[in-house]
Amino acid sequence: MELEQIKKILERYNEGKCTSEESRLIEQWFEGINQQHTTQINENELLTELTDIGQQLTNHIQRSQKRTLRPWYYMAAAVAMLVAAGASFLLLRNRPAAHTGDQELQLMALKNSKVISNGYMIVTIAKGDTAHLTLEDGSTVILNAASKLRYPVHFTGGHRDLYLEEGEAFFNVAPQPGSIFTVHAGNTSTTALGTSFNIRAYTHEQKITVALLTGKAKVITAQQKQEPLILSSSEQVRYDCKSLELVKTTFEQEDPIGWQQGTLIFKDATYDEVRAGIENMYNVTIINQSDKKTWTYTGNFRKESLRNVMETICLTESLSFTIKKDTVLLKNKK
């Protein structure tokens, strides 16, 4: 099951579109896991519990819906709900001290991986983690949490093409005369001209942001509705995936790369942007059970504990929250 499919299924749960029976089974199972496992979860035991609850959900779905899909799909969907809600096929582990404050234990939603396929290196980074890469040409890349980058093991033909398939990354490009360095993210392509730049392209945010720290860069779109934009230092361009438009603005130097120092920076951020930032940095899942789905939040957090971050945000938004292992529940303040 792809991560994006899991996210979509979790969104259906967040939006209250699951049946009451499905929701009850998920929440009952998760409550049981929280109470039974305080230090470490045995992988085989967790797999058994996943299978049991998955079968219950499968039986319920098959009773209540027309069988228009193959049976294996129902089981996959049921298990995916559990994985997205915090039940992973991995062992429980502690987060680094910089982000744990209250020493909450976290479940890894996916593992970091680095594999070679058809001449490409594919690097996937888990929630709550980052990675530093050095490419064949001496260029360096810092990948943010929940990100995926694909690039050739060997650059040839005067081109260095990289593909940010999900997430966020900072690129410090090594000069190499006669070899063009281009990063493709969604429908945008950014070509470096002696450059360091940051690209944010999380699919659910429906926008792509290219922020130039040094040098110059050229940004074009696949549709080519606009002329290519040339960025100078401290300029950024935002591509709206719905309107297909590029808009150029300026930024403060720390804003696009604060994540590298463990800083969360929100400026007029939507709920989805706030949720993604917190989930990625602290390796948690946020479930919003409140009536407030539309936010415009501004605030900075530098190496704060998860609890401190949630207390500040919920105070501003007039919400209450609870933290249960790797899940944060948001509710209306009573």
Image (tube, grey):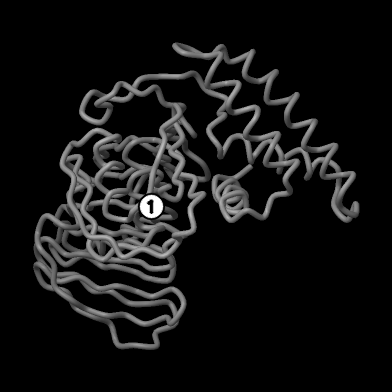
- Residue at image coords 34%, 69%: 189
- Residue at image coords 22%, 62%: 267
- Residue at image coords 90%, 52%: 67
Q: Nearer the viewer, residue 116 or 35?
A: 35
Q: Secondary structure at mark 1?
A: strand
Q: Quadrant of residue 74?
A: top right
- The percent position of residue 51, horizontal first and vertical second, equals 73, 25
Quarter of the picture containing the N terminus is top right
Q: Nearer the viewer, residue 179 or 171?
A: 171
- The percent position of residue 244, horizontal first and vertical second, equals 42, 80
- Residue at image coords 55%, 49%: 7
Disc 1 crowd rating (10 Å Cα; few below 14, some 14-19, many 20+) is: many
Mark 1 belongs to which amino acid? Gly
Which residue corresponds to mark 1? Answer: 167
Q: Quadrant of residue 330?
A: top left
- The percent position of residue 274, horizontal first and vertical second, equals 34, 54
Instruction: Examine the rendered structure and indicate whether residue 119 appears above or below residue 248.
Output: above
